[in-house]
Image (tube, rainbow, N blue to C red):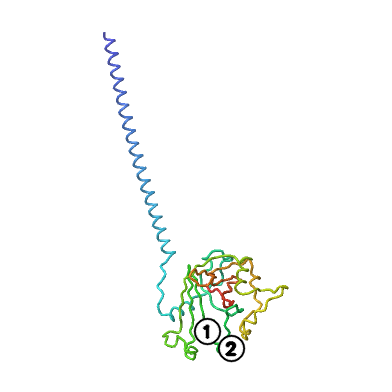
Amino acid sequence: MRRKRKEENRNDLGRGIICVLLVLLVSACGSRAHNTTAEGSVLEDTAVSAEEEESSGQTEETAFSKPEKPEEPADPDTRYESKAMEPTVSEFTEIWEEESDWYGDYQFVEYIRPNTWYTPDFDDGAMERKISFRKKTIMTLEPDLERTYMALDKETRVEDGGGWVDWNYDHHIRESHVKLIASVLDEERIRHMEERWGKEYEWDGSLADFSYRAMGNERYFADMDFRVHDYEGSPLLIFYNAQRTSAYKEETYLLEAENGTVYMLDDVMVSKWQRLR
C-alpha cells in the first residue's frame, strides 16, 4: 500500500515537471515569435525608409536634370541676340538616325546651286546686300517645328516699298509647323528629287548644266556642279507639310554632309548651313 502511494506521488511529480516544462517551452516560443515579428517590422521600416529616400533622390535628380525651359522674350531683337550669342558646340552625333539628332540651331553659310523656281536678281548691289543679311539667319529645329530668326534689311525694304518699313524691330521670327522625318538618301529619293528639279546628268553621263537657271547670278553660287548623287547613303531630314497645296508634300530636305555641315534643298535652291549647337 505504501509502495503504491509512493508510485502515485512519483507520477504526480513527473506530471508536474512535464507541465512546467511545457509552460516554459510555450513561453519561450511566444517570446521568440514576438522578437521575430519586431525584427521584421524594423527591417520593413528600414526598407520603406530606404525606398522613400531613393524615391526622393530620384525625384530631385529628375527635377535637376530637366529644368523648366525659361520663357522666351517677345521682343524678336532680344530673342535673336540671345540665340546668336549662345556658345556654339563643335561636336555632334556621328550618325544622325533619329529626328532628335537633328534638333538644334543652324546658321546660313552660302548659296550652292539654283533649283527650278529660283528668281534671279539683276541688281548686283542688292544681291550682295541680300546675301550679307542672309548670313545672319539662324534656323532652330524642334519637334515638328522650324523657327527661323532673320535680320531685316529695312533700308532696302524702304526703297522697294516692302512691308517692313514700319516694323519696330531689326529682326523677324518665322515659325513653321511641319512634320520632321529622319531618313536616308537612297536611289528612290534621288529620283523623286530629280522629278522636281531636273536630271543631274545628261544621257551620255556628263554633268547637267544648271547655270542657265542662275541667269547671270552664277558668281553668287558656290558650286554649280553640286550633285545630290554624291551624298547617296547620307542621313536626310524631310520637312513634310500635309497642308501644302503642291503635289509634293515634302517641301524641304536637309542633307547631312560632315563636321556639322548640312545642305538645305528646296524648290528654289541648294544652300549650305552650319550646325551651331
The answer to whether 153 appears left or right of 220 in the picture is left
Residue 176: x percent and y percent? 47, 73
Identify the residue shown where x is 59% and y is 80%: 111
Identify the residue shown where x is 32% and y is 36%: 31
Q: Which residue is mark 1?
A: 133
Question: Disc 2 residue type?
Answer: Phe
Q: Quadrant of residue 43?
A: top left
From the viewer's perspective, is residue 5 above or below residue 30? above
The answer to whether 162 appears left or right of 234 in the picture is left
Q: Which residue is mark 2?
A: 122
**Count of numbered circles in the view:** 2
From the viewer's perspective, is residue 108 above or below residue 3? below
Q: Residue furthest top?
A: 1
Question: Disc 1 residue type?
Answer: Phe
- Asked which secondary structure carries label 2, the reply is loop
Identify the residue shown where x is 45% and y is 81%: 172
Residue 73: x percent and y percent? 40, 77
